[in-house]
Image (cartoon, rainbow, N blue to C red):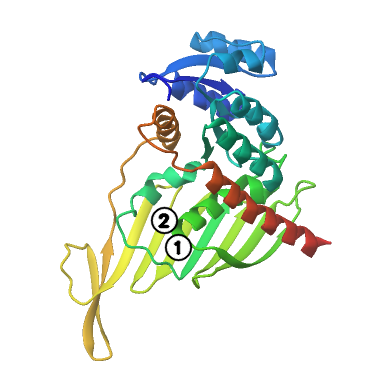
């Protein structure tokens, strides 16, 4: 266990890594060790802007840390995180955990052998609109998820399944809590040599069915979830941070803004509308605070390395099915 003020450093200060730095330097209950990036000029600029230390090598940073956040390109996740884990450091890895299930298993084994943990940055798990429905008893039968984004060159080093859809696979596995029974998938390459549009239909062993669509060739951003279950329908807009719940009840005991009465098999019933209160807090800040608290033993990772590995396994399977379909 680290001291009450864990020492945390950041590896990789590109677009997302800079956000890690901005949050960590403001956290009063940690000691920010510094940064390392193979782009020495960029690292120097970030260090100067925040008055923090930039290390000349990864081993030097590791020596000064209890935990490290890995915000490198996906292809570098394994080799970077492995060095940290083998030196007994806890690791926060931005999603996906790695670029293959095989390398993810290597990381999990290294963490177990060193007695440290891996936390994976599936940030949408903490989207305020998603958190707002946690008090509802969920037993979804059908889930529809859309994640669309306009094209940018950023993130195109990986297929859309590993870039965008993987967020929704994590949410889906969290919601359903059952093992995958079967998967069907299709996709297309439009703007890049990789898959830019993907659709998957997943059936779980408990009977739940899910439909996922992800695209980085869209006019507007869309991040929506629809959940259907017995006597309940939920819509979640993760972009607008808005959740709406429609429930069927025998008697309206709530102060709902909307209700509609109907008869079912001779019994009067009502559909009530509820809009859960959204508590606005930055999801990345929550993730990093959870990482710090987990290092000192006062909490546990929101998304464990094992969960990140399982999400990657489903994503990898979907991508393989798409490639088979294309060829």
> What x and y, as percent, mark residue 45?
60, 12
- Asked if marks 1 and 2 touch (Cβ < 8 Å), the reply is yes
For disc 2, the marked residue is 236
Quarter location, residue 35: top right
Of the pair 305 and 75, the residue shown nearer to us: 305
Separation of disc 1 and disc 2 at Cα? 6 Å
Give the total of numbered labels: 2
Question: Residue 174: where, in percent of width, then height?
Answer: 47, 54
Q: Name the residue carrying label 1.
A: 226
Does dot 2 land on a helix, a strand or a loop? strand
**Where 227 falls versus 275 (above or below)?**
below
First of labels 1, 2 by sequence position: 1
* Residue 60 locus on image (x, y percent): 62, 12
Front residue of this view, candidates 86 and 260: 86
Farthest right residue in view: 327
Give above or below for 220 relative to 82: below
Q: Nearer the viewer, residue 203 or 112?
A: 112
Residue at the spot 47% in from the left edge and 58% down from the top edge:
225
- In the displayed structure image, the side of residue 1 where residue 250 appears, left or right: left
Mark linked to residue 234: none
As drawn, is 23 to the left or to the right of 276?
A: right
Q: Is residue 249 left or right of residue 19?
A: left
Q: Residues within 10 Å of mark 1 (few under 14, many from 20)?
A: some
Residue at the farthest bottom position: 266
In the displayed structure, would residue 193 be above or below residue 23? Answer: below
């Amino acid at each position: 266990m680290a001291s009450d003020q864990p020492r945390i450093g950041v590896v990789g200060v590109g677009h997302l890594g800079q956000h890690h730095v901005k949050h960590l330097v403001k956290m009063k209950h940690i000691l920010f060790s510094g940064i390392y990036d193979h782009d020495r000029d960029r690292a120097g600029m970030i260090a100067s802007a925040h008055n923090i230390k930039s290390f000349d090598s990864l081993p030097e940073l590791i020596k000064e840390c209890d935990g490290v956040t890995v915000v490198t390109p996906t292809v570098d996740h394994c080799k970077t995180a492995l060095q940290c884990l083998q030196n007994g450091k806890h690791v926060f890895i931005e999603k996906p955990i790695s670029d293959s299930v095989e390398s993810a298993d290597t990381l999990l084994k290294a963490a177990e052998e060193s007695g440290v943990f891996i936390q994976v940055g599936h940030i949408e798990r903490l989207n305020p609109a998603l958190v707002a429905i946690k008090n509802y008893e969920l037993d979804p039968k059908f889930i529809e998820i859309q994640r669309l984004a306009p094209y940018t060159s950023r993130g195109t080093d990986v297929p859309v399944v590993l870039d965008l859809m993987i967020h929704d696979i994590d949410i889906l596995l969290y919601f359903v809590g059952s093992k995958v029974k079967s998967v069907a998938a299709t996709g297309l390459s439009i703007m890049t040599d990789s898959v830019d549009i993907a659709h998957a239909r997943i059936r779980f062993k408990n009977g739940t069915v899910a439909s996922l669509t992800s695209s980085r060739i869209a006019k507007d951003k869309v991040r929506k979830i629809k959940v259907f279950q017995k006597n309940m329908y939920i819509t979640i807009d993760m972009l607008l941070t808005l959740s709406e719940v429609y429930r069927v009840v025998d008697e309206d005991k709530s102060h709902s803004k909307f209700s509609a009465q109907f008869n079912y098999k001779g019994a009067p019933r009502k559909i009530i509308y509820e809009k859960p209160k959204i508590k606005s807090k930055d999801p990345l800040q929550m993730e990093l605070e959870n990482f710090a608290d987990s290092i000192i033993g006062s909490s546990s990772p929101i998304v464990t390395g094992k969960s990140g590995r399982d999400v990657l396994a489903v994503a990898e399977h979907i991508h393989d099915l798409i490639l088979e379909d294309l060829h």
